[in-house]
Amino acid sequence: MRRNLLDYEIVNIMSKKTTENFAKIVLNENVYIYKKLSNKFYSKRAITNLFQQSKGEKADLSCIILDKLELKEGVSLNGKPYKLSALILKYHTEASFISEPIKYWEEVKLAYLFLIDFGNYLIITKKNISGLRSIMQTVESIPYEVISGVLFTTKSLLEKLSMDNLDTSSTAMKARIVVSESLKDSFNYVGANTYMLNFLRLNNENDRFTISLNTSRIAKSGEKTSIIKLVDWTSHLISLIENFIEKETPLDLFAKPYEYSKERDNLTPISLTILFTRLLDEIENGTIEGAQYKYKDYLPRKININKLITKLSQFLKLNLGEDNYTYLVVNPENPIYKDLKVKLGEKSIRIYSNRLRNLDLLRNNDTSISFMDFTNNRSTFFINFDQCDYTYANRKLFKDSMLLGSIEQFLSIFIDEGSVNGITTEKGNLSKSSKFFNKNSAFNYVEERFKNSDFIVLDDLGGEWADHIIIKDSEISLVHSKTNNSKFSATAFTEIIGQAQKNMHVFNLPNTQINRKKTFWNSYYKKDKIVSKIPRLRTGSSVEDFIERFETIRVMPNHKKSVYLMVNFISKKLLETNLNKLKLDLDFAQRKEAIQILWQISSLIASCREHNASVYIICKP
């Protein structure tokens, strides 16, 4: 809410524009570091305009400048000349615990902005400040391989990693955070090539650094320090960056970034996925407190932000638009995406939408940001391409260098069996007198194939964990079946992969949840109100014995876990042919389906690795 100056009795507490006040300031060693596009120092006019923009962003006409410093020159401890600028603001904001404005119920807050201009690099540290668009157009992020490795030494202990999955399917694990005293020794890097890093924490002989790879932010934990010491520390960081020599680190095992500008003309986007993990983080920590939608001259309409995220979540397909660098969303379910465009700029990919521009996220510092700007600035979206091993995320182009090279290994999980050709239905026809599933059904095939097992339980249609749960010796297997008339269906494959990934938590369920299934597993199979004579316990002595064996096996140190998919719409030979065509970068009719299936296979294998489970896909020859 904007306020008039007359609403307050303003006392002139402006300083004399000296450095006396700034000498008393202590700051965390937490900075954004950027490479400038020009090696020139900023002019006084540029700094003055920036300060005015930052002040103008506050929705409070009583906002005043408590103090400022413009281009104070100095030389750092290691001999680098710099110019320091600083801005301190005082402003009022509505209390966060009231729904409507109440007179005199405002909070007084301070904001600060410090700029350390080294000519070729810019350091920013700030609090409660926005309105930096003009200066951000003059800088670029530190290259991924530099910022990730610049503080890495032979003695570094890797303590924390945050990563996002390059697989954007709805059931894939979107993000992971792992923590240890030394991840180098304890983290399993198998499958790391399918993840891109967001941030990491290093322990360099008790100096801890947190590095945000997608925002060029470096923070050093510890006590606060003076602005002059901050200058010296950041000057040292710049020297490390300037003299950086790429070296081998454990981070090399993750997805590698590629220079987007060089690949731009060869990229063909086919899908867009907007992620909400970072938005949820900011909601949970209170940085973002709400949302509103603005439409023309009407008053903004408040929106429940948690419901908003649910409605916005959608996988969006893309088609070429009005030029070779613009792509449009195809038939979105949510109309808010109707005017969304993806544009391949010279240096980055951004989304554009008037509807998303009118959707504001409300911050706790009395500022707001449109959903479109939040998504672009945080780069909380993924772009997948016709070039199947590329993904764009975090304002960078990543390549899963092992995806196409792993085709032979991926194919090894497929078990081709000639008798699958005779399967035409998932369950077949069911009647009240049915004691078995039809011979041409996938369910009958599974039960015959695994008939020598100790236990087979039919769990279909009961808030199912799998279609069949099978125990043999010390192995627990979850079996999912799916049939389709297509010869090569990416959609059907996506569906069964999603089912398998969603239910892998069954391996770790508490015993209480397993025991709740006892009555259900002791019943007869029911479908479409028809209760058959097919008992859900298909093989084994009793449901009680099955549950006891299940619980016993899970605590055995060397027990086995397996996931089986039974499908009739994938031919291993055709799949191998199509995946090899992808590897050779050939055009063919089923290219998009092959790309989707390849990512789904990679995603399923990665999920099974997470649960230490084996995976097999039974299919046609």
Image (spheres, helix red, strand yellow):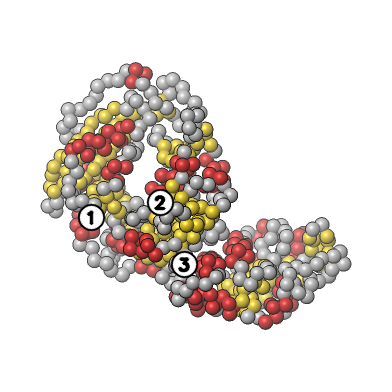
Q: Which SS class for mark 3?
A: loop
On the question of residue 225 being in view, the answer is: yes
Q: Is residue 53 left or right of residue 399?
A: left
- Between 559 and 342, the residue placed more toward the observer is 342
Question: Where does residue 539 sit, x and y in percent of width and height?
Answer: 76, 73
Q: Which residue is mark 2?
A: 350
- Between 495 and 214, the residue placed more toward the observer is 495
Q: Which residue is mark 1?
A: 237
**Farthest-out residue, bottom:** 418
Q: Is residue 541 above or below residue 501?
A: below
Label 3 to label 1: alpha-carbon separation: 37 Å
Quarter of the N terminus within the rendering:
top left
Label 2 to label 3: alpha-carbon separation: 20 Å
- Residue type beneath disc 2: Arg
- Residue contact between numbered discs 1 and 2, judged by CB atoms under 8 Å: no
Q: Which residue is mark 3?
A: 388
Label 1 to label 2: alpha-carbon separation: 30 Å
Q: Residue at x 57, y 73 (%)?
A: 614
Mark positioned earlier in the residue sequence (3 or 1):
1
Q: Is residue 374 left or right of residue 452?
A: left
Mark positioned earlier in the residue sequence (1 or 2):
1
**Farthest-out residue, front:** 322
